[in-house]
Image (cartoon, helix red, strand yellow):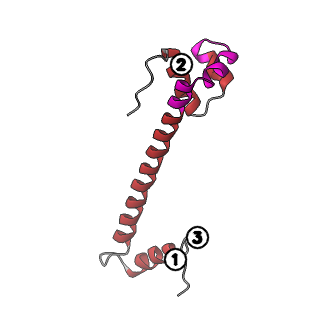
Amino acid sequence: MISPDASLTPSQLKAAELLTVGKIAKDVAKIVGVTPETISIWKRKPAFRALCQEMRLLALNNTIAEINSLNSLAENTLRDLMGPANPPAIRLRAALGVFSSPNCDLSF
């Protein structure tokens, strides 16, 4: 949960959010109704920088959680495909897909 510094204005909060998702300062300035120079000044404020950093960390953690969730889903799908209920050809193709993965090391 992000708890922004009470000294930040709603425009600064919006600017931090936009910068965090990859917008450039010039576009952010236009959206929040300030000059690009103002964005540069805000970027030097410790409270603004801390908020941007916290937002980036939250976005990164959310991305990691989503990747982990998708990884679990992929593992379950492969388990299902390789299960005895499927024909041998399907099970073989699933197994070969695992072994052809760039992260698969077959050296014993």
Q: Quadrant of residue 86?
A: bottom left
The amino acid on which the numbered mark 3 sits, given as a three-letter code, is: Pro
Marking on residue 102: 3
**Quick check: 71 above or below 41?**
below
- Element at label 3: loop
Q: Is residue 40 magenta?
A: yes
Q: Residue at x 37, y 34 (%)?
A: 1
Q: Name the residue under label 2.
A: 12
- Element at label 1: helix
Q: Residues within 10 Å of mark 3 (few under 14, many from 20)?
A: few
Residue in front for this viewpoint, 2 or 29: 2
The amino acid on which the numbered mark 1 sits, given as a three-letter code, is: Phe
**Quick check: 7 above or below 2?**
above
Drawn side of residue 20 relative to residue 90, left or right: right
Q: Mark 1 points at which residue?
A: 99
**Quick check: 89 above or below 47?**
below
Q: Where is residue 88 in the image (x, y as percent from the top left)?
A: 39, 81
- Distance in Å between CA atoms under marks 2 and 3: 43 Å
Q: Residue at x 64, y 16 (%)?
A: 30
Q: Position of residue 67 (x, y in %)?
A: 45, 53
Q: Give the range drawn in magenta.
A: 31-52
Q: Position of residue 102 (x, y in %)?
A: 58, 70
Q: Where is residue 85 in the image (x, y as percent from the top left)?
A: 29, 75
Q: In which quarter of the image is residue 89?
A: bottom left
